[in-house]
Image (cartoon, rainbow, N blue to C red):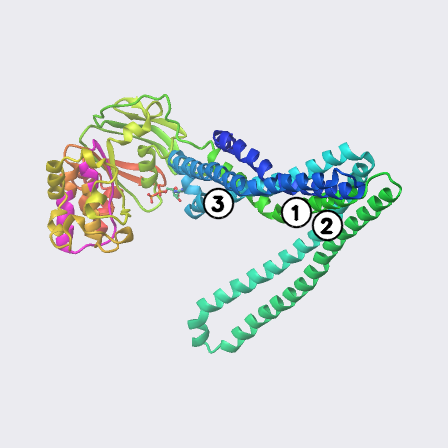
Amino acid sequence: MTLLSIYKTERGNLTISLILLIIKHSPALLLPVIIGNVINAIIAGGPETLHKITWNSVFIGILIFQNILTHTLFIKYLSKANRSIEKKLRFSLVKRMQELSISFHDNFESGRLQTKVLRDVESIEILTRQLANIVFTGLLNIVFVIVATLLHNVYVALFYFVIIPLSVFLVLTFRRKMVKSNEEYRLTLEVMSARVSEMVQMIPITRAHGAEKTEIDQVSSHLENVQKKGFRLDVLNALFGSSAWVTFQIFQFICLLVTGFMAYYKMITVGDVVMYQGFFGLIINAINMIINVYPEINRGFDSLHSLGEILECPDLEQNEGKKRIQSVKGEVEFRDVVFGYTSDVLAVNNISFKAEPGQTIAFIGESGAGKSTLMNLLIGYRRPASGQILLDGTSMNEIDLRTYRRHIAVVPQNIILFSGSVRENILYGIDSENVNEAIYSEVLEMSRVNEFLGKLPDGENTRIGEHGSKLSGGQRQRIAIARALIRDPKIIILDEATSALDVQSEVYIREAIGNMIKNRTTFIIAHRLTTVRHADLIIVLKKGRIIESGGHDSLMAKKGEYFKMNEVVQ
Ligand code: ADP
């Protein structure tokens, strides 16, 4: 399991920190024993007494002092391990996200992934800390007390064995009731908060309809609910909280009674009575601490499970061991390709065509006809259910897709720019040392990015706002074309933008596209028939099937669907 293996890498630091924890915690464990010793010595009297008192005190004094050093070291090693685990978890998640298939990402909202990287990893960090700090310390208390008592007096130990589980059971019963009323209250609070946010969104409409009073009355009923539930919760919490406290105290009192009687009948010494009171206190403390952090620990385990969903998800792109390709000629062939996102509907049905290197293939068809799906198959985001896609004669199933994708460039309809400079956006994915400035300048020219670079305040170093918000649609497209060109791809996938541009921008884009697709196998999802005209092959799709294909002239002569589309435009 990936998660466990991450913990294992930090075994050394974790072990050192736990050893340090035992040492640093030792004064708390030994204090009752020392106090018992001192009292026994005083009662016994005699020449040894002062000597015993002194040595016991010095011993515990030293133990107490060492805590400064060992506690700091304990935290240091624990934190070293914990922070490293945190980093490794985040790193594994990020890496895994890059390896998971696109169909996984299609179905998994990005917000949820982000929560995993931030919140879940944080809860696991807290879990590790609580496990070491609280649970381990608590268990140490319990084990130490039981062993020490067993060695001292079996009857007292037996008494512990009866009384500890009983007190835990009672306290848990009270707490369960508390958790339930807490949850009820939280739910009421959530409903109220949702209602308030809805109210805020509705304000313009409420105002327009003069419905202010109705809205206020409605929200007010939720507020009242919160008030009532909150009040009930406070009283219940007080009742259950004090019941739990009283339970523990009663058991401590019973312990005093039992050990008191035992001392009276000389079964144990007076010092032992004090010692057992101290021991009992240690146990109560431990149980209380563990019960208190239980919700956090639970959350931590939930998060572990939640990360497992990603780290152990098998939906990966299978590239290992497949043929790595160095170069691509650009011949692409679809043979009877069938694909469906769901089992009942086929998005692509029995598609066959062949693109020779350097050719331009245009796909047209109404929305939902299967054009984007074909492109996803071509990029390898999806795998055909049956049929084959051949690249330079080799089935794509046999190719390491990562090496293949170095030779393709995708210019999508919705261009994704990040909030860096224009230059950084164009050079995305290319190591800065490998940039050939002469080629870069040429690309700026060919993509017609040059035309607007001068107008930007800092030229190519102008930072574009998040998602390229400071640029016009035409400028963004040209940056995307430059981004494709700089990679000198052999295959281009171009999803033509549907948004209308002004005439001048349109001209620049046409020129840029013309430069881009020259001598490269190009697949265009075309939305304008003018784009299609010069394609070597036009494929008309309908409901996942090819209904017509051929060159512009032959399709026009056929007077079929393509002809009709052209008629409509004119
Ligand atoms: P086009 O690009 O021609 O508009 P698509 O390839 O996007 O068509 O869609 C083809 C069919 O597949 C449509 O019926 C669409 O609803 C369906 N489809 C597309 N993407 C998905 C998806 N991620 N999950 C399920 N169905 C999808």
Q: Could you tell me if residue 112 is visible in this image? A: yes
Q: Magenta stretch?
A: 483-512
Q: Could you say where residue 213 lies in the image, as x and y percent from the top left?
A: 52, 78
Q: Is residue 413 above or below residue 358?
A: below
> How far is disc 1 from disc 3 in space, using C-alphas?
21 Å
Mark 3 — residue?
A: 122
Please, what is the three-letter code of the amino acid marked with disc 3? Glu
The reply, left or right, for residue 89 in relation to residue 498 is right
The reply, left or right, for residue 142 in relation to residue 73 is right
Closer to us: 312 or 278: 278
Q: Could you tell me if residue 551 is visible in this image? A: no
> How far is disc 1 from disc 2 in space, using C-alphas?
9 Å
Please, what is the three-letter code of the amino acid marked with disc 1? Ile
Instruction: Tell whether circle 1 marks a residue whose Cβ is less than 8 angstroms from ligand 1.
Output: no
Closer to us: 533 or 555: 533
Magenta span includes 491: yes
Mark 1 — residue?
A: 291
Mark 2 — residue?
A: 171
**Which quadrant of the figure has residue 432?**
top left
Magenta span includes 448: no
How dense is the environment of label 2, judged by Cα within 10 Å: few (below 14), some, or many (20 and up)? many
Depth check, mark 1 against mark 3: the one in front is 1
Q: Is residue 498 above or below residue 377?
A: below
Please, what is the three-letter code of the amino acid marked with disc 2? Val
Q: Could you say where residue 361 lies in the image, as x and y percent from the top left?
A: 22, 36
Closer to us: 525 or 381: 381
Asked if disc 1 and disc 2 are in contact, CB closer than 8 Å, the reply is: yes
Judging from the image, what secondary structure is the residue with disc 2 in? helix
The residue most toward the right is: 265
Q: Could you say where residue 366 lies in the image, as x and y percent from the top left?
A: 31, 46
Closer to us: 529 or 497: 497
Q: Earlier in the sequence, mark 3 or mark 2?
A: 3
